[in-house]
Image (cartoon, rainbow, N blue to C red):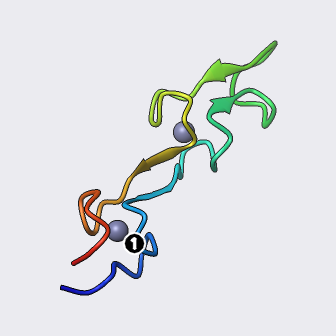
Amino acid sequence: MAKCQTCGGKGSVKCPKCKGAGRHGDGGFIPGGTKQCDNCHGSGVVKCGVCHGKGYV
Ligand SMILES: [Zn+2]
Ligand SMILES: [Zn+2]
């Protein structure tokens, strides 16, 4: 077992869809307001796809 280099052992990575903001809107995704990111559900982070959330590989 080795620590996952992608997430640094945390098991989660910054959401690529909202870039860690947890919502869309400021960048112009949704005209007229913000919307919770449906990829990370507003948390701004998603489970690491390399280690599947375990933090090690
Ligand atoms: Zn997101
Ligand atoms: Zn990982």
- Image location (x, y in percent) of residue 42: 56, 29
Residue with the most extreme bottom position: 2
Q: Residue furthest top?
A: 32
Residue 43 place in picture, x, y as percent: 54, 35
Question: Relative to 48, is 18 on the left or the right?
Answer: right
**In the image, what residue type sits under mark 1?**
Gly
Question: Who is closer to the viewer here, 8 or 25?
Answer: 8
Look at the picture and state if 2 lies above or below 9.
below
Residue 57: image quadrant is bottom left
Q: Which quadrant is home to the N terminus?
A: bottom left
**Which quadrant would residue 25 be assigned to in this image?**
top right
Percent position of residue 50, x then y: 28, 68
In this rendering, is residue 6 above or below 34? below
Disc 1 packing (10 Å; few <14; some 14–19; many ≥20): some
The image shows residue 25, relative to residue 5, as above or below, that is above
In this view of the protein, which residue sits in the foreground, 45 or 33? 45
Q: Which residue is mark 1?
A: 9
Residue in view at x 25 percent, y 67 percent = 51
Q: Residue 9's spot in the image, x, y percent?
A: 39, 72
Query: In what element is the residue under mark 1?
Result: loop
Comparing 4 with 25, the one in front is: 4
Q: Residue at x 26, y 75 (%)?
A: 56
Check the image and name the residue furthest to the left. Answer: 1
Kindly tell me whether mark 1's CB lies below 8 Å from ligand 2.
yes
Query: Whereabouts is ligand 2, in terms of quadrant?
Result: bottom left
Asked if residue 45 lies left or right of residue 3, the reply is right
- Relative to 5, residue 28 above or below: above
Residue at x-position 33% and y-position 82%? 3
Q: Which residue is painted at 52% across and 49% down in the image?
A: 15
